[in-house]
Amino acid sequence: MPADLIVYALVAAGLVFWLRSILGTRHGDERERPNPYVQTEQAADPTTDSPYLADEKPITPEERIMELAENKTGSLSVENKTAENGLLDISKVDKKFDISHFLTGAPDAFAYIVEAFAQGDKETLKNLLTEGVYKAFEGAIDEREKRGETAITEIHAIKKAEVIEARQEGKTAFITLRFTADETSVVKDSDGEILEGHPDKVTQMRDVWTFGREVNSKDPRWLVYETRDDLEDDNTTIPNKEMD
């Protein structure tokens, strides 16, 4: 095997391992992974470096939410006061919830799921989607395979991840984000002819996804409960599935 292919394979394998650890996925026979969306509990260790000075008071999860809502800079933001209040309600019920951890993991999950759908990776999708959303993705993959088509999607960059809604319903917390991403997407027929997209053209997609999690569950994952286009003329890279 050529040396460049060996290097590529090692990089790809490392990326998959890193994403799986970030997303907190579990398959039943492995130890529970850290959840990127909630503040992990760490034992106090005087030898561990702290981001705070001895006389500084650590910022609370609620203060992080309010700070993010007030300072809409960079790619991560809270869109409005209603979303901010919803996040604050979630943080009151889920004492481990940390918006910074959630917004670190959610864009990675978005890219991972979009590319897994293009690859027809049902095992990965089943671990990250609710049953209803998974069925929509599975059906689209099956139809694509019946037609003999193949898809290639690459997320180059996620420009924005904006919290547009957050709420607590019973024991389940829901957070809705609008993702703006640069992607390359191609669909080919059984002869390898391009049906949609272009391998060298980067286009922008805007999708709205709702993540949910039972706050008292030992399962650390935030699953995808809903996917939809943000605008009528957006790229239709993945199926739309509204929440049941």
Image (tube, rainbow, N blue to C red):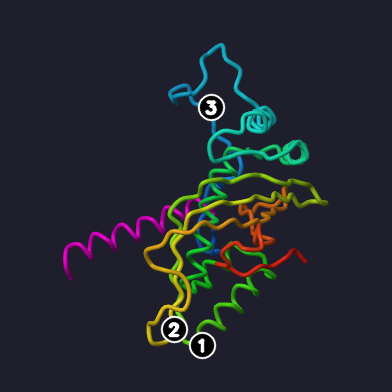
Q: Residue at x 51, y 87 (%)?
A: 147
Dot 1 crowding, Cα within 10 Å, few <14, some 14–19, many 20+:
few
Residues at circles 1 and 2 in contact by the CB criterion of under 8 Å: yes
| 207 is higher (above) or lower (below) than 238 | above
| The residue positioned farthest toward the left in the image shown | 2
| Kind of residue indicated by mark 2 | Asp
Which tag, 1 or 2, sits closer to the chain's start? 1
The residue mark sitting in front, 3 or 2, is 2
Q: Name the residue under label 2.
A: 189
**Residue range corresponding to the magenta coloring:** 1-24
Q: Does the magenta stretch include residue 3?
A: yes
Mark 3 vs mark 2, CA separation in Å? 57 Å
Image quarter for residue 95?
A: top right
The kind of secondary structure element at disc 2 is loop
- Mark number displayed over residue 44: 3
Dot 3 crowding, Cα within 10 Å, few <14, some 14–19, many 20+:
few
Image quarter for residue 76?
A: top right
Q: Which residue is drawn at 49% across and 70% down?
A: 118
